[in-house]
Image: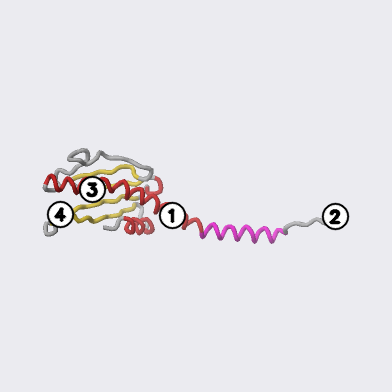
Amino acid sequence: MNKQSGFSLFELMIAIIVIAILTAIGLPAYQGYVKKAAMTDMLQAMTAYKTAVEICVIEQGGLANCNNASNGIPMTKSTNYVTSVTVTNGVIQLVGQNALSTLTVTMTPTLNINHGSVDWSRSCVTNPVDVSLNSICEDIFKF
């Protein structure tokens, strides 16, 4: 007579619980990696505009005429994670999409007359408030 063998219901339930625990631990970490990668895409999209604003300041002698599609500043563009990039009087505003859909980053230039440079400050705003996304934004956009 052949004896049947297999897993008991208890053993299967333990295996499912272990998989659920591993998934619960791994999913937030994965989402954090996706947000960091998306934020890097946003940073790359902003870099060309930041450089263009700095050149515009040198050429125009101020921030007043540094706007999208004028004085060497490109028109707005979109990427996988950026809906639009707007430049108004040198202030760069990036609006996120997909993994960054709740995020708006504002880069504000300040003329430093003593050093002859442009100093930048950033503002990361999420709506609704997402503390982890704000933290990632502040880590990626260091100025």
- Highlighted range, magenta: 8-25
Q: What amino acid is labelled 4 in the image?
A: Leu
Distance from label 3 to label 1 (Cα)?
A: 27 Å
Which of disc 3 and disc 2 is earlier in sequence? 2
In front: mark 4 or mark 3? 3
Q: What amino acid is labelled 1 in the image?
A: Tyr
Which of disc 4 and disc 2 is earlier in sequence? 2
Position of 75 with respect to 41 (left or right) is left
Q: Which residue is mark 1?
A: 33
Position of 64 with respect to 132 (left or right) is left
Instruction: Please tell me whether residue 63 is drawn above or below residue 70 in the rendered image.
Output: below
In front: mark 2 or mark 4? 4
Residue under the image location 34 percent in, 57 percent down: 134
Residue under the image location 18 percent in, 54 percent down: 118
Distance from label 4 to label 3 (Cα)?
A: 14 Å
Distance from label 2 to label 4 (Cα)?
A: 86 Å
* Number of residues whose C-alpha sits closer than 10 Å to that of mark 2, classed few (under 14), some (14–19) or many (20 or more): few
Q: Which quadrant of the rendered structure holds the N terminus?
A: bottom right
Q: Where residue 111 is drawn, which disc sits there?
A: 4
Q: Main secondary structure of the magenta part?
A: helix
Position of 49 with respect to 59 (left or right) is right
Q: What amino acid is labelled 3 in the image?
A: Thr
Instruction: Please tell me whether residue 77 is drawn above or below residue 33 in the rendered image.
Output: above
Secondary structure state at the residue bearing disc 4: strand
Which of disc 1 and disc 3 is earlier in sequence? 1
Q: What amino acid is labelled 2 in the image?
A: Asn
Q: Which residue is mark 3?
A: 51
Which of disc 2 and disc 1 is earlier in sequence? 2
Secondary structure state at the residue bearing disc 3: helix
Q: Which residue is mark 2?
A: 2
